Image: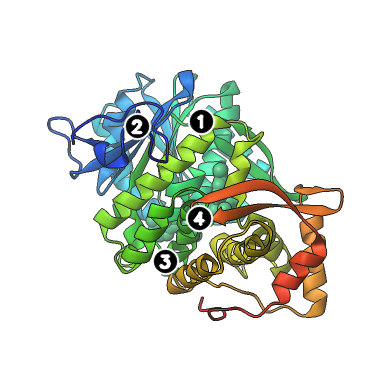
Amino acid sequence: MFLKAVAGATYGPKADQPRMDQLWTRPRRGAAYAWPMRTVAVALGKRSYPIFVGAGLLSALGRHAADLGLGRRCAVISDGHVAPLYAKPAMASLRSAGFEPLLVSVPPGETSKSLERARACCDLLARHRLERKSFIVALGGGVVGDLAGFVAAIYLRGVSFVQVPTTLLAQVDSSVGGKVGVNLKAGKNLVGAFHQPRFVLCDLRTLDSLPPREFRAGLAEVIKYGIISDAPLFARLERDLPRLLRRDPKALAEVVARCCEIKADVVRRDETDSGVRAILNFGHTIGHAVENIAGYGKYLHGEAISIGQVAAARISAERTGLPPAEVARIERLFLRAGLPAAIRLSAAARSRLLTAMRLDKKVSDGEIQFVLATRIGRARSGEKVPPAFVQRVLTAPARVGVNAG
Ligand SMILES: NC(=O)c1ccc[n+]([C@@H]2O[C@H](COP(=O)([O-])OP(=O)(O)OC[C@H]3O[C@@H](n4cnc5c(N)ncnc54)[C@H](O)[C@@H]3O)[C@@H](O)[C@H]2O)c1
Ligand SMILES: [Zn+2]
């Protein structure tokens, strides 16, 4: 029951691996954070790192950072929504561990993921003489994590960084795996690096202040993990959804840790995104196209991939034998989570959607590449689907109901 996490924790029941319920970790003597805490290992050789998951962990930030043996100077990069809420306890924790943190706050929102903003951050770090042994703390959602991680990857040709994700999406997805970057006018995430954090600290209590719509959007990625690789997780989500929507820390701890474990395993097998990692794109081919044609701000990423996942499930029913009853379960879970399961499109919008999909990188020989499920808990990437088929699925009426989001 009180085993420490073992490097190489993977998803799926394997006899030689510890099960998730064996990964409880006892806090060190005098630790200020709440019991229990879960630790998930991301096993990447020399770049391995732990993900800590629990309620109230922010106060232990300094102590964990001290374990890294880095320099005293560091920077906390956050945004204008998160900094007023959590920068004070984060800075206090770092100071009490002997660090001299500098707070850098950027405007909230996707526009902060820019080369200009990264450069401004680098200028500030240089002005405050952060050196090679200094480190950067990313305190915020995926935007802050991608930007701060990118700054850490390029400043002085790379300094250490740690992730303190404060959105559900960032806790289960963007903070794990080392993809960092910024956007160009030509598209999202076109400039970036692979730069793994030294640790990830998921304080579930920070989710309390997250707007409900952002929280539900994060659930779309959570549900995705169930569909692509973990049927028991999917069943748990069906059962525990009301507790999750109430942000019950115990229910959240189980689910966030499990999702991190699944992502950690996929990343371990494909750190630089050349194969297996594609499985994480379930629902994203149509989801990205929905984001593109709807215009900035209409759909959150989680909402768009919710529509994309339901469509991918329907395609899976016909192409990879996903049983119709499981398609219905998938659709129902998204709707219960308050997420949209379908999109009403005019004929013109539908053709723009298909064009957007064709422009996406996942096209070969005119056929669009999809991640499709064979059952809940199992998926395959690289499934070619003709555009006409996608069109047919997008025009089919919803089976359970339309757009509860
Ligand atoms: N690197 C990766 O592997 C990866 C994976 C998925 C997504 N991403 C990126 O992540 C970004 C989206 O991340 P996101 O959904 O976290 O968006 P976000 O960082 O913009 O956060 C959403 C909103 O919530 C606010 N917020 C954050 N935490 C809060 C809290 N605890 N309380 C109150 N408000 C809070 C933010 O200020 C923002 O307004 C995108 O840029 C996407 O490209 C990266
Ligand atoms: Zn996503």
The residue at which mark 3 appears reads as: 211
Residues at circles 3 and 4 in contact by the CB criterion of under 8 Å: no
Residue depth check, mark 3 versus mark 1: number of the one nearer the observer: 1
Quadrant in which the N terminus appears: top left
Q: CA distance from mark 1 to mark 4?
A: 20 Å
Residue at image point 38% right, 65% down: 238
Labels 1, 2: front one = 2
Q: Residue at x 53, y 50 (%)?
A: 378
C-alpha separation, residue under disc 1 versus residue under disc 2? 19 Å
Q: Position of residue 120 (x, y in %)?
A: 60, 39
Answer with mark 2 or mark 3, whichever residue precedes in sequence.
2
Question: Residue under circle 2?
Answer: 15
Q: Which residue is mark 4?
A: 227
Kind of element beneath mark 3 = loop
> Quarter of the image holding residue 135?
top left
Q: Amino acid at mark 1?
A: Arg
Q: Mark 3 or 4 closer to N-term?
A: 3
Q: Is mark 2 within 8 Å of ligand 1?
A: no
- For disc 3, does the CB lie below 8 Å from ligand 1? yes
Whether tag 4 and tag 2 are in contact, CB under 8 A, the answer is: no
Q: Amino acid at mark 3?
A: Pro
